[in-house]
Amino acid sequence: MNKRWSLSLALLMMASPAFAAITLTTPEEIKVAAINGHEVNTSLFSSKKNAHQLKAGENVISVRYTQYFEENRNIGTHEIVRSNIVNIKTPLLEDNQNYVLALIDNPKNIDIAREYAKQPIFGLYNSKNQLLVKQQGAKSSNLGIVSNLFTEGESVDKSQVNIQPSPEYTSQAKLNAPIAKTQSNIGVQNGEAQQLIHIWKNTTKAERQKFMTWLAEQ
């Protein structure tokens, strides 16, 4: 009886849409700092540090470009280039789908990377490798290594004062459509306006003065 109950529960859990998952994969050069305002903590040696779970619909992913360069292997010198936090608002994501976040025009050498880190560009792709949204970071100067160490893990970069450019959504992206005013809504609004005009015309001078005084205080 217990085995039958366990099997039934397992099948129910597998069939339930609550257990549907969206997977976001990122390369080594992209660190996810937060998802929908919740800080992401991943171990350095975790096998899942480049795979993240998202919810269906819109998500806000806070990311940072970071890349390791060896300047001289013989003497062991290296440099880590890092950007400020960039917030990416996704289009509507579908359940049970896989998405990839990648760098656009990924730099190949340290000199280009230093400049690139000032304003990195991220692209979100669907499982068909179609670009859904492109997000560029706010123009800023490179952060020093010392300040980078102290900002590690922050979901919001306090040193970033410039506003990042608006996201560029492609035709493949599904977005929430703005609510258009229907003819019935317009009719209701016109009716309410006429009713207010009628009430105003039938009020006394003292009542109008009292209303205007109240309105000025709001």
Image (tube, grey):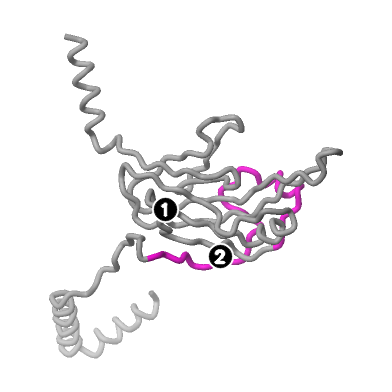
Dividing the picture into quadrants, the one containing residue 7 is: top left
Question: Up-down: is 126 above or below 167?
Answer: above
Q: Quadrant of the C terminus?
A: bottom left
Question: Up-down: is 12 above or below 64?
Answer: above
Label 1: which secondary element: loop
Question: Up-down: is 130 above or below 139?
Answer: above
- For label 1, the crowd category at 10 Å Cα-Cα, with few meaning under 14, some 14 to 19 and many 20 or more, is few
Judge from the rendering whether residue 210 lies leftward or rightward of residue 29; answer left or right: left
Q: Residue at x 34, y 79 (%)?
A: 215
Q: Residue at x 50, y 33 (%)?
A: 48
Q: Residue at x 26, y 86 (%)?
A: 208
Task: Kindly identify the amino acid type of the residue bearing the numbered disc 1.
Answer: Asn
Q: Quadrant of the N terminus?
A: top left
Numbered circle sitting on residue 164:
2
Q: CA distance from mark 1 to mark 2?
A: 25 Å
Was residue 166 drawn as part of the magenta stretch in this picture?
Answer: yes
Q: Which residues are magenta?
A: 141-170
- For label 2, the crowd category at 10 Å Cα-Cα, with few meaning under 14, some 14 to 19 and many 20 or more, is some
Judge from the rendering whether residue 114 lies leftward or rightward of residue 17; answer left or right: right
Numbered circle sitting on residue 129:
1
Task: Kindly identify the amino acid type of the residue bearing the numbered disc 2.
Answer: Gln
Q: State which tag comes first along the sequence, 1 or 2.
A: 1
The location of residue 102, given as percent across then percent down, is: 52, 52
The location of residue 173, given as percent across then percent down, is: 36, 60
- In front: 151, or 201? 151
Numbered circle sitting on residue 80:
none
Label 2: which secondary element: loop
Dividing the picture into quadrants, the one containing residue 212 is: bottom left
Front tag of 1 and 2 = 1
Q: Residue at x 56, y 65 (%)?
A: 164
Was residue 217 drawn as part of the magenta stretch in this picture?
Answer: no
The location of residue 162, given as percent across then percent down, is: 61, 66
